[in-house]
Amino acid sequence: MSHPNLKLPPLKQFIDGEWVDSASERTMETIDPATGKAFAQVSAGDAEDVDRAVKSARLAVEHGPWTKVPPAARSRVLNRIADLIEARGEELATLESVDNGKPVTAARMADIPSSAGVFRYMAGWAMRMEGEQIPLANRPQGQFLAYTQRAPIGVVGQIVPWNFPLLMAAWKVAPALAFGCASILKPAEQTPLTAAALVQIAQEAGVPAGQLNLIQGLGHVVGAALVGHNEVNKIAFTGSTEVGKTIVRSGADTLKRISLELGGKSPTIVLADADIDAAVAGAAHAIFFNQGQICTAGSRLYVHESIYDKFIDRLATVAAALKTGPGLDPTTQIGPLVSEEQLRRVAGYVEIGKKEGAGVAVGGDAVGGPGYFYRPTILTHVNQKMRVVQEEIFGPVLVATRFKEIDEVVAMANDSVYGLAASVWTRDVSKAHAVARALHAGTVWVNCHHVMDPAMPFGGYKQSGWGREMGAAAYEMYTESKSVCIQL
Ligand code: NAP
Ligand code: MG
């Protein structure tokens, strides 16, 4: 065990308000990506555990105390969860760093406060499950009273990835609880720790038994069992486009509701008039934040030809100066990738890029030694047909291209199966609006990147997903609408 002093949450299943071993009593290892060593054993569930959790969730969502308490009481519990996340912030940031590899400084600044923020925001929505009174169009006025009512969608299976383990769990669990759903959370097998801590926090805050269950284990076992289960009303998934498609196919048998937050290949577009200092820093943040393992990574850079050479020089200098090291070292800016598999995938893509004829402006190889470190990398001399330009790498690898005309760069930006996000860097407000309008992306940032907020709907065009999370969109996602029509 490489971290004898780490304070671990229970690494079991949480079903019907109790921490239990899985029915099979199997376990899986969790690995510290900075060393490549296993440091904990986690219970690994299967379909039997999923079934027990679904039964408990079903009871909770139909008859549990959460269905009866005033909405303000639910709201207070969500606020208490936010308080407890903040109070345990340092411990959670450390867990996240050891489990995922990310710099603890980044977890402290981003993952932890953003997770608390989602619960605080959704605490407000718990008191806003409003319907509408509807004047009927083809009936005499005054003879009917018609209104819509909103009901929780029911039992939800929530499957999350490893890149922001706590935050992605918060994005799922907070709206589910706010809108009265009962959740079965399935963390990624690589990062089981903070989801367990969150469940512990929710229990302490007063979430009743069955309302939030946790099943740790493998995606093709636990995740697939959730997707196939008759009594699960909805799957909310964040992860790869490939697994998203599998979920759609197997969810079709029960026609359960499915929402998907999938991959991306988001463009960072720098116009000729951009503030260069801000754009260089912004482009670096867009691709290198979280070691590039972020769905909105600005992984395709398009720079106007008049400033291209200078821009790439400066960006390469910034990239080369980023300090790579273990996440727990407070001076680290780039931690290890999450796993050996991910390191191989990223390195494999850079080799493909080189074979396709790309040049390497900086980086282009692994750091070597123990741990899964890869150098921040910029590939140049690329074109739209190359795999490194079309496929999601999910690592610190940027592909850079020059452009002449705005129409041309918009066409290149939209030439992707993905449509998650984009950023535009310019001082010209008219161009900013015009480009934002023309891009096929669920989020467009101007003179910033990765700015997310629980009030702002988030999701993707095209193969980046189905539906929008956060903001008022979360209401649509976790409730059913019922029309009630009364003859007076
Ligand atoms: P992944 O392999 O799709 O895994 C995501 C989750 O799905 C994990 O919990 C995984 O479990 C589970 N899973 C795997 N196979 C499954 C199956 N057959 N049925 C049900 N669940 C299954 O994705 P990842 O590699 O962890 O994450 C990286 C990807 O997520 C990238 O493509 C990235 O763009 C995307 N992402 C998108 C967003 C967004 O909001 N749009 C945010 C973050 C990440 P195991 O861990 O056990 O495999
Ligand atoms: Mg791990």
Image (cartoon, rainbow, N blue to C red):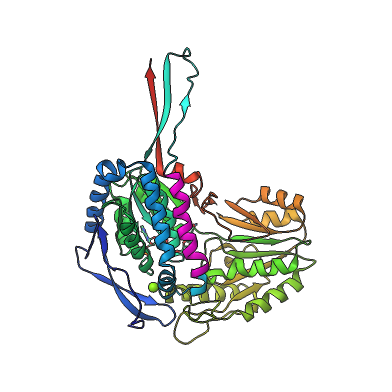
The spot of residue 334 in percent (x, y) is 54, 76
Q: Main secondary structure of the magenta part?
A: helix
The quarter holding residue 172 reads bottom left
Q: Residue furthest bottom?
A: 369
The spot of residue 126 in percent (x, y) is 41, 44
Q: Residue at x 43, y 49 (%)?
A: 123
**Quadrant including the C terminus:** top left
Where on the image, by quarter, is ligand 1?
A: bottom left
- Is residue 99 a member of the stretch shown in magenta? no
Q: Nearer the viewer, residue 74 or 21?
A: 74
**Residue 271, can we see it?**
yes
Q: Residue at x 52, y 79 (%)?
A: 330
The spot of residue 321 in percent (x, y) is 63, 81
**Quadrant including the N terminus:** bottom left
The spot of residue 399 in percent (x, y) is 63, 69
The quarter holding residue 71 reads top left
Q: Nearer the viewer, residue 75 or 93?
A: 75
* Above or below, 461 relative to 382: above
Q: On the rendered structure, is 269 left or right of 475?
A: right
Q: Which residue range is magenta in the image?
A: 107-126
**Residue 239, can we see it?**
no
- Is residue 121 a member of the stretch shown in magenta? yes
Q: Nearer the viewer, residue 100 or 67?
A: 67
Q: How many marks?
A: 0
